[in-house]
Amino acid sequence: MRLKKRLNHRVPFPEPVHRETDRKPFLAIIAIILLVSFIGVLNHLEKEAITGSAVQTIGFVKEGKEVAFEVKTAGINSATIHLTEDTKNAKIVFEEQAPSSPNVNGPIYSVVKVSSDKPVRFSTLDIYFKINENELINKGIAVHDFQLYVNDQPVETTLSKKVDGYIFYIATTTTFGDYVLAKRQEAKPAIEEAADTKVTEPVLPPEETSQKEEVGVVGKAIQQPSESNGESFWQNIKNFFSNFWG
């Protein structure tokens, strides 16, 4: 009986101990990664806010096609490039520069450097501007005096419309380089060729030559009366003898 009771009596086994995993190092790593990513995004946004830039990537476009893209940098709203050869894996960069130019005088709205990472063949690049009218006037540029300069050369710029305080312009260029958005400069007056040509005055004969010529003329004038006097002298003798013998 006692043995049976002992067998029926079950001793409970202890439950397994569950150890809690320490996740603090893992969470710390995730937090560091997120913090670094956030700082990188802030730096990128800050750089764009200061300089302003836009990049257009061309995957593959055949010859004769055009590519339209947004820019939204320093007054350039969008652009359309007309390609003249097959273009693959190219980048066109619009990067804002300091608003100054050594060869463009007068008020400058902005300066944008346009470049590509590899040669891009194109016929024309249509530039579409969207300018805040108040900002333009505050910079000392009248609405009808706005013009684009590409590599210091003026490009015809046309006002297309005015909407909600913004002015829209259009210009067409054939090259990349430094794009200066500035006040239209007055054309410099053309310099006449005569102003640069030295005036050649007629060379007068030396005084000695003039004197010799005058002396010669005077000599001839003096000799003429002597010859006439000689003729009258012989004529008088002839007349005398004619009267004498007559």
Image: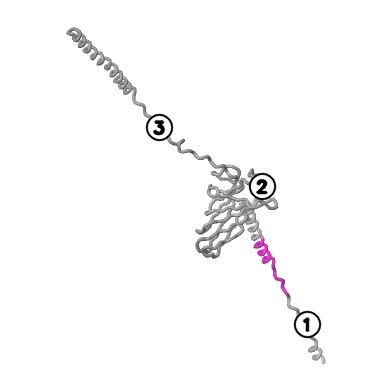
Cα separation, mark 3 vs mark 2, equals: 56 Å
Question: Residue tagged by mark 1?
Answer: 12
Q: Nearer the viewer, mark 3 or mark 2?
A: 3
Quarter of the image where the C terminus is located: top left
Q: Residues within 10 Å of mark 2 (few under 14, many from 20)?
A: few
Label 1 packing within 10 angstroms: few (<14), some (14-19), many (20+): few
Category of crowding for the residue at label 3, using alpha-carbon neighbours closer than 10 angstroms: few (below 14), some (14–19), many (at least 20): few
Q: Amino acid at mark 1?
A: Pro
Q: Position of residue 195 (x, y in %)?
A: 46, 35
How is the rendered protein coloured?
Answer: one colour
Amino acid type shown at disc 2: Glu
Relative placement, left or right, of 199 versus 239 is right
Q: Is residue 215 magenta?
A: no
Specify the quadrant of the image occupied by residue 200.
Answer: top left
What range of the chain is rendered magenta? 18-34
Label 3 residue SS: loop
- Left or right relative to 57: residue 167: right
Q: Amino acid at mark 3?
A: Thr
Q: Residue most toward the left?
A: 245
Residue under numbered circle 3: 200
Q: Which residue is mark 2?
A: 135
Q: Secondary structure at mark 1?
A: loop
